[in-house]
Image (cartoon, rainbow, N blue to C red):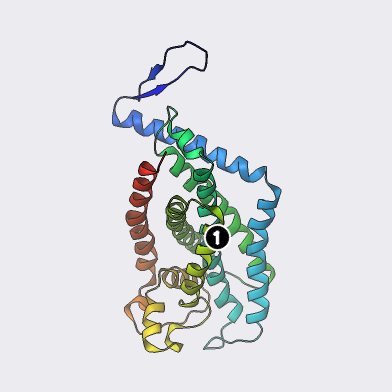
Amino acid sequence: MSTAVDSRRGAEPTEVRSPAGPLARLGWAVADGWVMAGRNMRHVVRSPEEIILYFSLPIMFVLVFGYVFGSGMAVPGNGNYREFLLPGVFVMTMLYGLGATASAVAVDASRGVVDRFRSMPMARSALLTGRACADLARAVLELATLVVCGLLVGWRWRNGVGDALAAAGLILLLRLALTWVGILFGLLVPNPDTVAVIVFPLAFPLTALSNVFVAPDLLPQWLGAVAAWNPLSATVAAARELFGNPGIGGESWAAQHPLPLALGWPLLLIVLVAPLAVRRYQRLSR
């Protein structure tokens, strides 16, 4: 049960009762989360500079990495390096997207928007789930843009539409997990400028120590082990396998079983990080 205060002078506070029953509360939470997702998407639409930034970065990744690296490197077995590289670029773009999530959450927290919504008669989970849904919708558009750009530079999927959609689903699942990481960062670091400074130093080593650009077997043994078990590596390897693009193989269990890891790592991240984000949101100073 929550209390809403009438803005008219002398009016008594009115009590707004939460829906009774688990199904009613779930429906209430879903409806409020949908409203918050729409609010976040409208903010993006009303900021043309954000739209340009969101879609120019993926295009730049594809063109720069596709032509610069794709023209000067080879894949064992006479594979096409550009086809090898593009699934990694897809996943790398999803990783760097958590910076936008963290910055948006930090902006809301620093401006008191979180407190304002928390004082309203709405589901407590709506602000976080709405942000996650809005960012996932944006990630779908980003991935579609990446696929179109990849097709223009010569990348192709080889195993049919069904496997290609499954690969896209795994990439978006990782993005959903990273969205919760971004939400937690945004709640922990209330200064939006500081968030941007923190995210890049964390994301860049995670990309470098993966199979996005080279095989982990080419790295020193201990770095190769870290790269093989990197959550990014699992999703990239699974996407390459489903797209039918050249892979790198490997003798480790992680390299030979990318599909279960591509499912397990994001789900584990969500299970671990989402409750921390919710707890931080509940304890955020008013």
Look at label 1 and name its amino acid.
Ala
**Can you say whether 247 is above or below 281 in the image?**
below
Place of residue 126 in the rendered image (x, y in percent of width and height, measured from the top left): 44, 38
Q: Is residue 243 above or below residue 67?
A: above
Which residue is painted at 56% across and 56% down in the image?
A: 193
Tell me the residue at 39%/71% (across/down). 258
Q: Nearer the viewer, residue 167 or 283?
A: 283
Residue under the point 45% across and 73% down: 237
Q: Which residue is more in the foreground, 192 or 50? A: 192
> Percent from the top left, x then y, of residue 55?
65, 58
Q: Is residue 110 above or below residue 261?
A: above
User: Number of callouts in the render?
Assistant: 1
Q: Is residue 142 left or right of residue 225?
A: right
Are there few (<14), some (14-19), or many (20+) residues within 10 Å of tag 1? some
Judging depth in this view, the residue of 253 and 7 nearest the camera is: 7
Quadrant of image for the C terminus: top left
> Is residue 277 among what the camera can see?
yes
Taking the view exactly as shown, the residue that stands out farthest to the left is: 21
Residue 12, compared with residue 31, is above or below; it is above
Picture quarter containing residue 59?
Answer: bottom right
Instruction: Where is residue 283? Give x, y as percent.
Output: 35, 43
Residue 124 locus on image (x, y percent) = 39, 36
Depth order, front residue of 83/230: 230
Q: Residue at x 56, y 38 (%)?
A: 39
Asked which secondary structure carries label 1, the reply is helix
- Image quadrant in which the N terminus is located: top left
Residue sitting at the far top: 10
